[in-house]
Image (cartoon, rainbow, N blue to C red):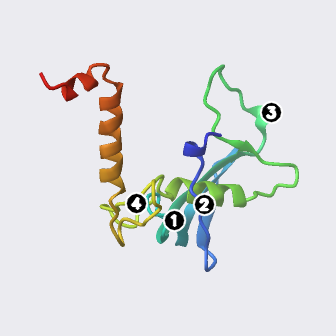
Amino acid sequence: MPESLRPTSCTFKAPLSWNVLVSNTGGALLVSGTVTGTGTTECARCLEPLDVAINGEVEGYYLLNAEEVEFEEGEDEEFEVLGEDNTIDLVPLLEAAILVDLPLQPLCREDCAGICSDSGVNLNEQSCDCAQKRAQADAEFEEAKNPFAKLRELDL
């Protein structure tokens, strides 16, 4: 999985609360509920710790007897088949609900300035002149690429 598409890492200081309801719909079990709590991740720009509220929706659908159900070709199968032990593992459902609820790019604040890519300074806490130095160096480089730049120095 590409780095940019990996889920945000998150730690939890306290256990999350979860509540699910399992309903028998005839040939299947429907699992629905919520998982709530607070997780700690890092700001996507400045990498400072950031608390995020978790309020995920838990969903699952488990067929009781898959042999009795006929599916059309290409039909989207968003279900699991209940195992022979008739138990439902809630961990994948809870993890999925948490991952879906986490922000893709968590920010400590909307106007977070991030970290300077040259000096590593947290731009929310202090400033640096790296951007000006980089702009000047880029301008000098562009000027040096011009084959006629030396002609400006001629005194005609």
Residue pointed to by mark 1:
42
Q: 74 or 92, which is in the foreground?
A: 92
User: In the rendered structure, which amino acid carries the disc numbered 4?
Assistant: Gly
Expressed as whole percent of the image width and height from the top left, the position of residue 60 reads 63, 51
Q: Are marks 3 and 2 in contact (CB under 8 Å)?
A: no
Q: Which mark sits nearer the N-terminus, 2 or 1? A: 2
Crowding near pointer 4: few (<14 within 10 Å), some, many (20+)? many
- Residue 10, quarter of picture: bottom right
* Extreme-left residue of the structure: 156
Crowding near pointer 3: few (<14 within 10 Å), some, many (20+)? few
Query: How far apart are the alpha carbons under marks 4 and 1?
Result: 12 Å
Judged by depth in the image, the label closer to the viewer, 4 or 1, is 4
Picture layout, residue 109 above or below residue 117: below
* Extreme-bottom residue of the structure: 14
Q: Which mark sits nearer the N-terminus, 1 or 3? A: 1
Q: 54 or 17, which is in the foreground?
A: 54
Q: Which mark sits nearer the N-terminus, 4 or 1? A: 1
User: In the rendered structure, which amino acid carries the disc numbered 1?
Assistant: Glu
Q: Are marks 2 and 1 in contact (CB under 8 Å)?
A: yes
Expressed as whole percent of the image width and height from the top left, the position of residue 64 reads 76, 45
